[in-house]
Amino acid sequence: MKKDGALSIFTKGIIAENPVLRLVLGTCPTLAVTTSALNGIGMGLSATFVLVCSGAVVSLLRNIIPSKVRIPAYITIIAGFVTIVQMLVKAFLPDIDAALGIFLPLIVVNCIILARAEMFAAKNPVLPSILDGLGMGIGFTATLTVMGIIRELIGAGTIFSLPITASFIDPMLIMILPPGGFFVFGILVAVSNAIANKKGKPVVESIGCDGCSQNGNCPFAGDAEKCEKSEATPPAEKGKEEDVNA
């Protein structure tokens, strides 16, 4: 693998394909756990560990796992690493475990991890899969940490529980409640879109099948688990095929 190729795989998850701001994945834990910066780092690092390890294992087994059972197999692999993370956090970081609550074991069904296993690790060698997982994990962690810092600073007047503005500015409690999470998330997506637009990149306009370039022509429309955008027939090509068949 070339150095430039490795760097591209690693960095795309941090900026160009940031899983939260660009791909709009993992929104539920993003909104739920970013009431403080420490919670954001805890969730981000936990997900990064699972991303890297599950990506490596899925890549190693990509030619062994039957296609028909690949999704259950991926979930089983992911669940094994999530269990390891949960046990380590419970043993050494009980406060973070209590703060993250149910969202820590729910990493098993985090769409970022499952998507990288399906769309990248299952089709690439081990080293690129590790780099992809690491880049996506860093992008996820960075976004959660930034959201956590903003919400904690405005909502509690602290950063990492250290007093910053609490002594002279009344905290806005709404920022550590769900509405505050949606507000900060929307602002960060808007900033990401502005930067993307300035660089001539496509902006995030919608999520799910509505945001896919193959919408209306995809045989897997509405089924995220089977979606293979990269292999779907482009609209122009589909039109040509229909003309030939006619």
Image (cartoon, grey):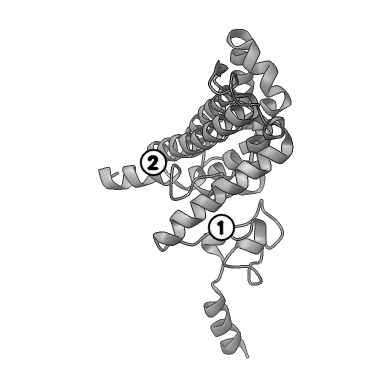
Mark closer to the chain start, 2 or 1? 2
Q: Residue 96 carries which label?
A: none
The image quadrant where one finds the C terminus is bottom right
Q: Using the image as rendered, state which of residue 114 and residue 23 is in the foreground.
A: 23
- In percent of width and height, residue 69 lies at 66, 43
Q: Which residue lies furthest to the bottom in this view?
A: 246
- Residue 187 left/right relative to 109: left
Question: Mark 1 = which residue?
Answer: 204
- Looking at the rendering, which quadrant does residue 10 occupy? top left
Q: Residue furthest left?
A: 3
- Residue 1 left/right relative to 200: left
Q: How crowded is mark 1: few (under 14 residues within 10 Å), some or many (20 or more)?
A: some
Residue at horizontal 65 percent and vertical 44 percent from the top: 183
Q: Residue furthest top?
A: 91
- Looking at the rendering, which quadrant does residue 113 occupy? top right
Question: Mark 2 = which residue?
Answer: 10
- Residue 152 is at least partly visible in this image: yes
Residue at horizontal 53 percent and vertical 31 percent from the top: 145
Tag in front: 2 or 1: 1
Q: What element carries label 2?
A: helix
Residue at horizontal 63 percent and vertical 19 percent from the top: 86
Q: Using the image as rendered, state which of residue 79 and residue 48 is in the foreground.
A: 48
Q: What residue type is labelled 1?
A: Val
Q: How many labels does the image show?
A: 2
The image quadrant where one finds the N terminus is top left
Cα–Cα span, label 2 and label 1: 21 Å
Q: What residue type is labelled 2?
A: Phe
- Residue 66 is at least partly visible in this image: no
- In percent of width and height, residue 81 lies at 58, 25
Q: Do the residues labelled 2 and 1 touch (CB within 8 Å)?
A: no
Q: Is mark 1 on a helix, strand or loop?
A: loop
